[in-house]
Image: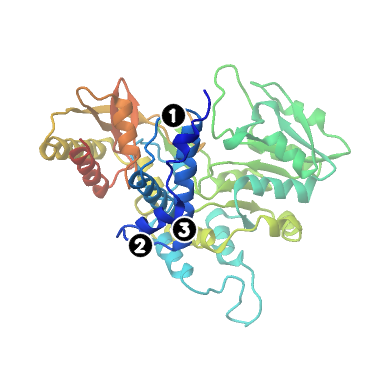
Amino acid sequence: MGIDNKKLRFIPAIDRLVAIAAVESEMSGYPRNLVIACLRKATDYVREALITGTAVDVSPEALVARARQLLEHQTRSSLRRVINATGVVLHTNLGRAPLSRRAVANISQIMGGYSNLEYNIDSGNRGSRYDHVSEKLRQLTGAEDVLVVNNNAAAVLLILSALAKGREVIVSRGELVEIGGSFRIPDVLKQSGATLVEVGATNKTHLRDYEQAIGPNTAAILKVHTSNYCIVGFTSQPDGAELAALAHKHNLPVIEDLGSGTLMPLTIGGQTEPSVTERLVLGFDIVTFSGDKLLGAGQGGIIAGKAEYIGLMKKHPLLRAIRIDKLSLAAIEGTLQDYMLGDSCRDIPVLAMLTIPAAELKERADRLYSLITHQTERSLDCKVIALNSPAGGGALPAAALPGYGVAVSLSGISAGHLERNLRQREIPIVVRVQDNKVIFDVRCLTEQDLTEITAALETMF
């Protein structure tokens, strides 16, 4: 279809649109250059539509309205609070672990001004950012020394770069995991300059497989905890103590990437997650884990273990490139204070959500059902249902967390349409969709969330 130049001439001049926008109360408060930029984008849009033969309103009022929407979209925060009604506690796409009150207060205190991030108040000299959490982590894990970087993948990269560059690292084939974003353990090994030596089979690796692979160029044995999947059936892996003993027999460090990591033994939904302390006691020289998963803190990669090895990492030039920032550090320190001073299963949201009794979840679901059915005028098909929730975040993959939710459907409106409307609110509500019903899993919902969900359903249609 050819271009209709006559129609293009109907597009108003920018000067005319600027004059109209200048007297609009909703646009007059924006900087002039930003208004003009959005008006240009609006006219570019309609020009492209006309060129492709798409029907579009080219009136000044329509263009100014489109520019107003662009202004609102561009100037509001893209990173926003959402309501997590999926039941996935460690939802990677929704920011993983929500922080405790103490952690939030710690961040708030630090973010508004200056801090002693790398200043030793006692001596008046330069200090180390790592000292703010290292002593607390030593106490909580029993490790000789601890180092914190910006995430767990960076922790593994630093370890291998410092201890194994140009040499071989032995890993079981059944542990060559892929984590979020398609990052794989073999890729991290390659980036560190180490050479991967695979041993065993996907489902079974024996101690003798490791021993036969040890040679003069071996730098370490790496065990990767399969925290985001399970291999079941005809399987086996060496006992951790046996693997550590074998490594030490050959004067090699044995490293474990715990992935999600936990400071306390957790048995949830029929699955047990080993603690960092347990692995160190078994003889592992270095253990790494995430800060924003089962620990319940901010993003970080925590390296705990023998001081001689961590000392090498502290001197490695890569450390500066992957160092942790002050706000993540404040979140981790506040969370560690919860472990030391409070009831962690009560004070740390992740642990509270994972361990909440089913009876309490039933009460919460009943509460949401009551709010919806009593305050929403439109007739809804609404009922409380039993369901299972995943832990999420690459943690406890086989755990089925029994809980409750509220299933909602509206006559004449698809579940997809309802889900989309809930998701596109000022405060998005993220839900599950099943059997053409919207499911509000109440595991991660607060009382305020219940009220907001009810208000959304009441005013949406």
Q: Position of residue 206 (x, y in %)?
A: 70, 25
Query: Residue at horizontal 58%, vertical 70%?
Result: 117
Residue type beneath disc 2: Ser
Q: Earlier in the sequence, mark 2 or mark 3?
A: 2
Residue 201 appears anywhere in the view: yes
Dot 1 and dot 3 residues touching (CB under 8 Å): no
Name the mark nearer the viewer: 1 or 3: 1
Q: Is residue 90 left or right of residue 161?
A: left
Q: Amino acid at mark 1?
A: Thr
Q: Is residue 236 rendered to the left or right of residue 460?
A: right
Q: Position of residue 152 (x, y in %)?
A: 61, 46
Whole-angstrom CA distance, mark 2 to mark 3, is 11 Å
Q: CA distance from mark 2 to mark 1?
A: 31 Å
Q: What residue is pinned by disc 1?
A: 54
Residue flagged by tag 3: what amino acid is it? Leu
Label 1 Cα neighbours within 10 Å, binned few <14 / some 14-19 / many ≥20: few
The residue identified by callout 2 is 28
In the rendered image, which residue does mark 3 sit on? 34
Which element type, helix, strand or loop, lies under badge 2? loop
Front-lying residue, 36 or 175: 36
Q: Residue furthest top?
A: 234
149 shown above or below 45: below
Badge nearest the viewer, 2 or 1: 1
Image height check: is 325 above or below 387? Answer: below
Q: Element under label 3?
A: helix
